[in-house]
Image: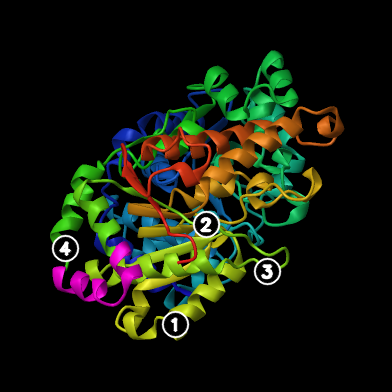
Amino acid sequence: MSYEVGDIINRGYKSGRFLSIEESFNANAVELVKRKIIALDSERISLVQGPPGTGKTTIFQQVISYCFDKTDRDEVFLYIAPTNKLVADMLQRIASIYRVLGKDLNDLKREVRVYGSRFKYGEFEGLRKPIDNEVKIVLSTEYQRVHESEIQKKYHLLIDEASKSPIHKPFITVSDELLEMLQESDREGIIASLNVIGDPKQAIALGDEYRGRDDLLLLTNLIRGLLPEHLKKEVDKGDIDVTVAAYQALKGTHYELLEVTRRLPYPSEVPISMGFYDGKLRAYKNAEYVLKEIEEKWNSNEAQMLRNINEDFFKVVDTLESAITTRTPIIYVHVEGKYLHDYLFNERRAKVGLLFSCAISRILGESVTAIAPYVDQQLQMRLSMYYQYGEVAKDVIGMVNFTTVHRMLGAEDSYIIAILGKENIGKSYYERTIYFMEPEIFNVQLSRHQKLIVIVGDLFKLRKEAGKIYEKLNSEEVQRFYEPSLMLKIMNLKTTVEKILEMAGVDKYKNPKKAPCSSTGNGCLFFKWDQGS
């Protein structure tokens, strides 16, 4: 995908500014970063943790808008992001800022540079020229070489970590030196301030060699360097999570947590809030109002047509209608089934996911995204959509999307069908399956929806297996080899699963076969898909 620079800038100028409620909810984080940039604090480093849907990028937009005229002539804002999409989004926001400040396109052409691999510049070709004396803002993906002339500049680094592990490696390797330099009162040097936004709790790795390597996360590496010695030792031993330690020791001085999500409707944020964010994440909007609006869009004729197709569609439509009318934003469909060792596709879960996808898109006329941890699962579901459900889905093909959890990081949709991966541990500790290698995947999977989420899989088994591996981590056999933070991550996962089962009213059942066929609890509707269906 390519990005037309002219179109992006025009949209920014037309919007005037990004009006959003983030301005009030993120005020503490914005104030923290502003202090570091305009030299009110001698220690020039700010770290912001942004859970799903909390408006991470908006922080930097607000900071640039406020500080633009308050920095010296030789100071430049350097925004670095891992993707061209994020850079394009920031460019639109910069254009919006320029309009609000009363600056025209010629001002933007002189003062802004944009470096990326997928931009089409057209009449804005000058935006990729080297940095000169007039440049105030530079936007770049991490993979680009920032072109600087002989003009000496001081950079306010605005790093959008986007929750990916091995990015910003040049900064990670010198993080200790950066901290030492930025904690000095002397503001000489090429880096005027360092400001990082990300979320270790969504840190999905890009390869096996990075899994579990918290030291390759820039945000956590910098937090650890700022912690007092007693907390640093507790973090290194795995006794306390690094972000919990940051909240205790660094909040207000170097660290802030964005605590309000505008994406997830209450109470669908509660499971990940309790599991991954120590109960601090809360939702701005309420499912009561969101699902009331959905109910008004319910197409009874389409619903009845689907009910008449077969018993499976009848069950799906009834389950959806029940969730919407009871204002329940989470549907947990219990579907057992094994993934073959080398074949990461579960046919029964695919079937249920496709039924719900077709039903939602036809009845409500809105987009749906099915996400799974495995490429095999999403590809096979895409094929099944065409070849097995083509007649039912022919009018909504464009509204139903299939993707992996990794590709969905940073994205969202109105309705999410979360197809769970393998819930078993694996043959040994060293052959852990995906949720036990990267528990953060579960967090990402449960935090992409704006209105309603359907979870398809076996949470009972995931809870049981999480308990087993937690016990293994306490054994002497693996104590010497596992990452100290993994035990805490497994507990994050287990707590999240337990909260979903509690909200569904089925947490007391150890064996899912003894659970009722369906129940509606406090925020989650439980439905047990019949065996063999």
Mark 3 vs mark 2, foreground winner is 3
The alpha-carbon separation of the residues under discs 1 and 4 comes to: 27 Å
User: Reading the chain from its start, which is encountered first: label 3 or label 1?
Assistant: 3
In the rendered structure, which disc, 2 or 1, sits on the residue that comes first in sequence?
2
Look at the numbered discs 3 and 2 and tell me whether their residues touch, using CB distance below 8 Å. no
The circle on residue 388 is 1
Q: Residues within 10 Å of mark 1 (few under 14, many from 20)?
A: few
Q: Residues within 10 Å of mark 2 (few under 14, many from 20)?
A: many
Q: What residue is rendered at 50% in x and 63% in y?
A: 349
Determine the secondary structure under disc 1: loop
Name the side, left or right, on which 324 lies relative to 385.
Answer: left
- Which mark is drawn over residue 139? 2
Q: Nearer the viewer, mark 1 or mark 4?
A: 1
Residue 134, position as x, y percentages in the image: 49, 55
Magenta span includes 192 = no
- Badge 3 amino acid: Tyr
Determine which residue is flagged by label 4: 297
Residue 304 in magenta? yes
Magenta span: predominant SS is helix
Residue underneath mark 3: 343
Give the quarter of the figure containing the C terminus.
bottom left
> What amino acid type is highlighted by mark number 2?
Leu
